[in-house]
Image: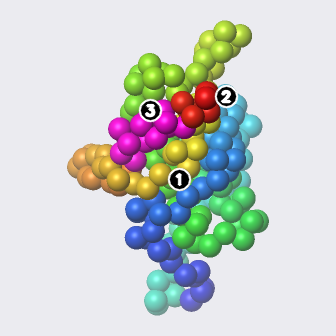
């Protein structure tokens, strides 16, 4: 049987204990945005998936759909994280954090826009950006909230919206002083 790497510390992953650099998170969000604006024909079309090997030696394969943006971004992240020598816990933590950041931005979009954390420029009103103050909080905030997702509306650890926004507001206000 193929030797698998040590499993991640899921307690650390699920609590948001491991922060990610602002630069790393911003780069991943930028890559996500680039993918959204790129025709699928230009995406990484290599066959990707998982090969599962049972104790009896039999094997089965799960192939990832290359037309799903989350699969594309995860492939890109894992390639980068592996090149940088990150541990399994760091890889999974940062990937999970990116998914939670995307969910946070989508679920709180109108509020974030009203509070000035989602920014549009006059030159490109259709293109939205996220303030560095908010991104810096999201890069390191622990998961102190819960969101429901999936068909069974199962609880998942995530950011506490009020705390994140208050901290981002505090950082934004201190930057303006």
Task: Find the magenta span and give its range.
Answer: 159-171
* Magenta span includes 166: yes
Residue 32 visible within the image? no
Mark 3 or mark 1, earlier in chain: 3
The front one of 79 and 12 is 12
Alpha carbon separation for disc pair 3 and 1: 19 Å
Q: Residues within 10 Å of mark 3 (few under 14, many from 20)?
A: few
Residue topped by disc 3: 106
Where residue 161 sits, quadrant-wise, is: top left
State the residue position of label 2.
37
- Location of the C terminus by quadrant is top right
Q: Residue furthest top?
A: 122
- Contact, CB < 8 Å: mark 3 with mark 1? no
Q: Is residue 34 magenta?
A: no
Foreground mark, 1 or 2, reads 1
Give me the residue at 63% from left, 20% from top: 127
The residue under the point 42% across, 37% down is 166
Q: Which quarter shows the N terminus?
A: bottom right
- Residue at figure coordinates x 38%, y 42% from the top left: 163
Q: Is residue 101 left or right of residue 20?
A: left
- Look at the magenta stretch and give its main secondary structure: helix
Tags 3 and 2 touching, CB below 8 Å = no
* Viewer-proximal residue among 113 and 40: 113
Q: Which mark is residue 140?
A: 1
Q: Left or right: where does residue 162 sit relative to residue 88?
A: left
Which tag is nearer the camera, tag 3 or tag 2? 3
Res. 13 in view: yes
Q: Is 112 situated left or right of 175 in this image?
A: left
If you read the primary sequence from the N terminus, does the residue marked by circle 3 or circle 2 appear first?
A: 2
């Amino acid at each position: 049987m193929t030797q698998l790497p040590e499993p991640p510390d899921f307690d650390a992953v699920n609590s948001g204990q491991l922060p990610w650099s602002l630069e790393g998170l911003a780069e991943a969000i930028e890559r996500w945005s680039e993918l959204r604006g790129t025709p699928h024909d230009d995406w990484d079309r290599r066959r990707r998936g998982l090969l599962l090997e049972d104790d009896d030696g039999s094997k089965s394969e799960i192939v990832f759909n290359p037309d799903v943006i989350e699969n594309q971004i995860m492939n890109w992240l894992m390639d980068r994280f592996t090149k940088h020598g990150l541990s399994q816990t760091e890889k999974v933590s940062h990937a999970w954090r990116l998914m939670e950041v995307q969910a946070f931005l989508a679920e709180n979009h109108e509020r974030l826009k009203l509070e000035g954390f989602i920014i549009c420029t006059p030159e490109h009103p259709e293109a939205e950006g996220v303030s560095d103050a908010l991104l810096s909080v999201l890069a390191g905030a622990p998961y102190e909230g819960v969101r429901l997702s999936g068909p069974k509306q199962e609880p998942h650890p995530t950011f506490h919206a009020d705390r994140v926004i208050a901290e981002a507001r505090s950082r934004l206000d201190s930057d303006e002083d």
